[in-house]
Amino acid sequence: MIDASPVQSLILDEAQHRTMAPDGGQRPGAATGEAPPLQCEWVPWGPETDDARPPLLLATLGSIELEYAALHRGVGRFDTPHRRVIRVTGDDRVDLLDRLCTQRLAEPSTPSVHESFLTARTGRVIADMVIVHTQDDTWIELDALQGDDVLSTVQGMVFAEDVNLHDMGDAITRIDLFGPAAFAVLAAMGFDLLEVDVAVQGQARAWRMPTGTLGGASLAVPPAAAAETWRAIDEAAQGGGHTCRTVGWYALNMARVEAHEPVANIDFGPGNLPAETGVLHRRVSFAKGCYPGQEVVARMHNLGHPKQVLRVLHMPGMELPVAGSQVFATDDVDLASPLGQITSSAPAPMASQRGTALAMLRWKIATVGDHVQVMCDGAPVKASVVEVSSDDA
């Protein structure tokens, strides 16, 4: 058995009342008749063990195409039970976190959002985090799979400092909003993120996603208010004339791969070096004080390069390699020595359904602008190597 999200019943109810037609089939000339309800699909986030059950993620509400369209034309509402929040309080919290994180953190007097890694003394990533600052506290938002590691690591560095850690666990429900109407919908709900990065309203909090590739924002509310908030998003969207759809992981994954956006625990994870992730300059400051593993990270940046690095691959057409497919150098005619592996892939609807993938490649074939061979349906296909982001070194 897998734990259910507080809004799962609302998602199931929505599937019963939605149809494949984006406007309920009321377009002039549309076919008549009663459309069947949509069929939800769910996927567990992470393995199930004797001690823990993974959160259940909505894969699709039944129409990936309409969900993808909402991400680009209106607002996509995504239930986020696979993310975890650790609340940090105390006068010394910013100083402590700044000494542990790879990113320079702002003073708490300025509400702000930062992307950062937590690294071990070996320089390898423990977790990929979003740091959300307010005057009253600091939130560490991250994949639930790394929550325990981060909690124990940070707690182990607290000695005489005025710092307290609180695992929010079941105390909040997380909802993400994506799309061009996301900020207008939140503003109508009282969370105006047009001028600030973080907005607090009672026990609820909203913040800008720091990457911004999909125009996203995150919302956290007490579980008792989750259903009311879920409905309020719909009402705010309708009041502003915006299309609102609940979106699943399939549509969101397609949009983020198309936008060249890596995800921790899929494209990179614990054990990788920051220089291997493709998002080094978005997570690491090279003009701040010490943190665990800084010497390793700085030495690699200034004097060398990693053995492997995450890159984007553009396929020549609609060919689509699956995750785990091997990547070879173009001069390896016998395909004898794999030098990389696909981590994610999806078609890119905004680029004529071109196959797009993220891949961890050995440095010798990771040169941007060069080509590699990728296995697709049992045959090698030539693909071009593209950097993950314009900020990538």
Image (cartoon, helix red, strand yellow):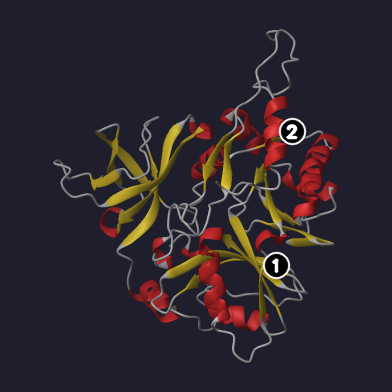
Q: Position of residue 264 (x, y in %)?
A: 48, 57
Residue 266 in sight in this render: yes
Q: Is residue 257 left or right of residue 162?
A: left
Q: Residue at x 29, y 51 (%)?
A: 340
113 vs 337: above or below: below
Residue 318 position by quadrant: top left
Q: Amino acid at mark 1?
A: Ser
Residue identified by numbered label 2: 243
312 vs 36: above or below: below
The image's mark for residue 385 is none
Q: Residue at x 59, y 85 (%)?
A: 158
Q: Residue at x 29, y 31 (%)?
A: 377
Q: Split into 4 quadrants, where in the image is the C terminus?
A: bottom left
Q: Position of residue 348 (x, y in %)?
A: 49, 35
Q: Is residue 201 left or right of residue 70?
A: right
Q: Residue furthest bottom?
A: 160
Whether the residues at callouts 2 and 1 have beta carbons within 8 Å, the answer is no
Residue 184 in sight in this render: no
Q: Amino acid at mark 2?
A: Thr
Q: Observer-nearest residue: 237 or 12? A: 12
**Rounded to the nearest whole Å, what is the CA distance between mark 2 and mark 1?**
29 Å
For label 2, the crowd category at 10 Å Cα-Cα, with few meaning under 14, some 14 to 19 and many 20 or more, is some
Residue 373 position by quadrant: top left
Q: Secondary structure at mark 2?
A: loop
For label 1, the crowd category at 10 Å Cα-Cα, with few meaning under 14, some 14 to 19 and many 20 or more, is many
The image's mark for residue 112 is 1
Q: Position of residue 84 (x, y in %)?
A: 61, 60
Q: Position of residue 350 (x, y in %)?
A: 54, 34
